[in-house]
Structures are given as C-alpha cells and as structure tokens.
Image (spheres, rainbow, N blue to C red):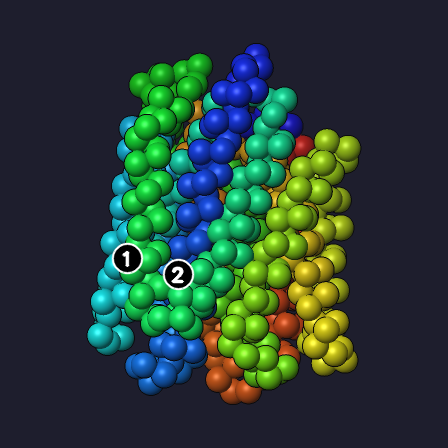
Amino acid sequence: MNRGPSAVDNPVSWRTDARIISLIGLAHLISHFFQLIIAPLFPWLKTEFGLSYAALGFVMTVIFVVSAGSQAIAGFIVDRFGPGITLIGGLISLALGSLSFGLSQNYSMLLISAVFIGMGNGVFHPVDYSLLNTRVSVLRLGPAYSVHGITGSLGWALAPVFLVGLATSFTWRASLFAATFLPIMVIFLLLSQRDLLAAKSQETPEKRLTDESLFGFLRLRAVWWCFVFFFIVAMAAGGIQNFLPTLFFQIFSFSRTTAAMGITTFMLASAAGILVGGWLVTHQKQLERNISLALGFSVLGAILLGLNVVSPSVAWGLIALMGFGSGLSGPSRDLLIRASAPPGATGRVYGVVYSGLDFGIAIGPVLFGKMIDKGHFYSVFFGIAACWLLALLTAWRIAKLTRSPSTAT
C-alpha cells in the first residue's frame, strides 16, 4: 500500500506537535464556521428578500462551486509557494465575504458575497493536510486528524449558535458584521506563530517538479474514487447543514432558535464520533470496515427520521446518532486518502479530492431545497441516507485500489 505523503518520522517534542495541531485546528474551525455563514440565517433572508429555499440553496451552491475550483488551484499553490501565505489569503477572503453579506441589499449582492466565501474556503484543506502530513510526527498523526476533524465539527456547531443568537438579539446583518472579525483575529495569531506555517519535506519543490509530472497524480484511480466518495458524502452534508433547522421547524414546529440547535446537536455528536474514530483507527487497521460501521449508524438514523415514526425527543437522539456516525468515519477516511496520495503531491491530491466535497455541498442544497419547496420534508432524510450508503460502498473500492498498486492507475 502506498505510504502517502511523508510525515515526520522521528518524533519531535509533543509541545511542538501540539502547537502545530492547535493552530491548524483553529484555522479549520474558522473554515467550517464560514461554510455555514449564511445558512442559519435563511429564515431572515427569506423574509428580507422574498426568496424561495431553492434560491437560497443556490447561494450555497455558488459558495461551494467557487470553493471547489479554488481548492484544486490552492493545492498547486501550496505545493509551489507554501501553506502560510495561502492560508492568510483565504482568511482575508472570508472576512471580505462576511462583510459583503452583511451589506447586501439584493440577491445579486448575496451571490457576489458567496464568491468571496468560496474563494476563502477553498484554501484550507490543501493547507491543513500539507502541514499535518509534513510537520506532525507519524506517531501523532492519527490524533492530529481527530483534532482537525473535531475543530471542523465545532466550527459547524458554533456557527448557528453565534449567528442565530446575534440575529435574534440584534439583526441578521449585525451577526455577519460580528463574524467578520473572527478570521481577522486568527490572521494576527498566525502571524505571531509564522514559524509553524512552513511545510517541511525531504524533497525540494524544484526536485519534486523535475522528478514527477505536475499532473501525474491525476492518473491514479484511487484519487478519483476518493473524489467520488467526498462528493457523495458532501451531498448529505449539504442537506443537513443548510436545511436541518428548516426541517425541524416545519416537521416539529420548533421555534427558529430551537430548530437551529439541530445543527449544533449533529456537529457536537460528530465531534464525539471523531474522537472515538481516532481511537478506532489505532485498533482496527481495515479502514473500510471502520467507515462501514460509522456510516451504517448515520444511515439508520436518517431512515428512521424519514419514516416519520418518532417523537420530537427521539428525533434529537437520531440526529445525534447521524452526527456520531458521520464523525466516526472521519479519521479512517483521512487515512484512506493519505494512502492514495503519492509523495510530493500532498497539496495537489488533497486539493482535488476535497474539491469533491465542495461540489457535493454545492449540489446538495439545490436538490434538497427543491424537495422542501414542494413539501417533501421527510424525503430529504431518505435522500441523505442514500448518499451515505453509496459512500460506504465507495470506501471499499478505494481500499481495494490502495492495497493493489497494480490496479491503482
């Protein structure tokens, strides 16, 4: 099996690893927070601009289509120029996007703002995994992936609490203006720790570009199956992140604030799942089995919600089950991708693979938004379950390719 991009083989101080992991984790939290910068505010925007849920979902589509393209490009930039400047540029773009959203006076301005958010969001996975795989000791790489995943889930969990809380107490514009300061504060922190933002490698960029075709990794079938896996998983995520509050509001007649806690419940459970998933990969090396177990929990929860056979209190438990399963798959998923990446192409592989995540989240809101506009609330959960089931099957195909080098190209 391909070992993937090189990490630090000789363990360095745990304090150094902890600083790197914490810094990357904070940046990842901001990235995921801004993926939900507008979705929790849909009820306010629908009233303010008179938009359908499908039109609001298209705003999210713009964010993630732009992010997908930016992510693939960012992977090449990271490999060539380094992760530090790329990361700071992404944070600046997020701040501009949030400010622009808050100033929006019409639908066109919402779409322009979405472009800024998409450009900013696209840099994080190539940057994060480039740094993790080249700066963190191999022995601590599993826990590093867990922390990375947990901070992302916390970003998703905090976004609705932060945005809806401020929108309820003040206005939806005030919540966006407040959010603008978050990436700015992180930029100042990164500048104070800039010695940690340079990826290390045993090969110089010049040697890598000479010895290996810049686009050679695109010939690997495992890379494209990883892309498909992320695309499918992200379609499910698009339905949950953007419309779970709306579904809970419509199905169970919760208040807007209570319904918004559905995302927070899902993401906190996901964070718990990621923590357990980091332990799981150290005990069960067959990553596809871990993913099957994890996504099996999520499929079960989604199907039960779609059948409309549970009370509101049980629904919260099923949302938590779905989130736990989704998070549990995370560390095994990331290690599966690492096994598919050739040395020297870390940023490029993660950029292309994670662009599948953005494309999936771009399509999901439009698809599920149309279902909600037609009143098919329960069918959304069946659609989400189908996505997770397909992803489960795809993981087995990736595992087969990474274990059989002769079939990988």
- Compared with residue 296, is residue 188 higher up or lower down, i.e. above or below? above
296 w.r.t. 30: above or below: below
Q: Residue furthest front?
A: 169
The residue at 24%/70% (across/down) is 104
Q: Give the CA distance from mark 1 to mark 2.
A: 9 Å
Location of residue 193 with respect to 367 vertically, above or below:
above
Tag 1 near tag 2, CB within 8 Å: yes
Which sits earlier in the primary sequence, circle 1 or circle 2? 2
Q: Amino acid at mark 2?
A: Ile
The residue at the point 67 percent across, 33 percent down is 403
Task: Tell me which residue sits at (71%, 42%) in the image.
Answer: 276
- Which residue is found at the position 62% from the left and 32% from the top? 143
Near-viewer residue (57 or 102): 102
Q: Which residue is mark 1?
A: 97
Query: Is residue 35 shown left or right of residue 10?
Result: left
Would you name the residue on which mark 2 appears?
37
Residue 52 placement: quadrant: bottom left
Residue 77 seen in render = no
Q: Position of residue 30 (x, y in %)?
A: 42, 48
Q: Residue 107: x and y, percent? A: 27, 75
x and y, in percent, of residue 407 in the image: 61, 36
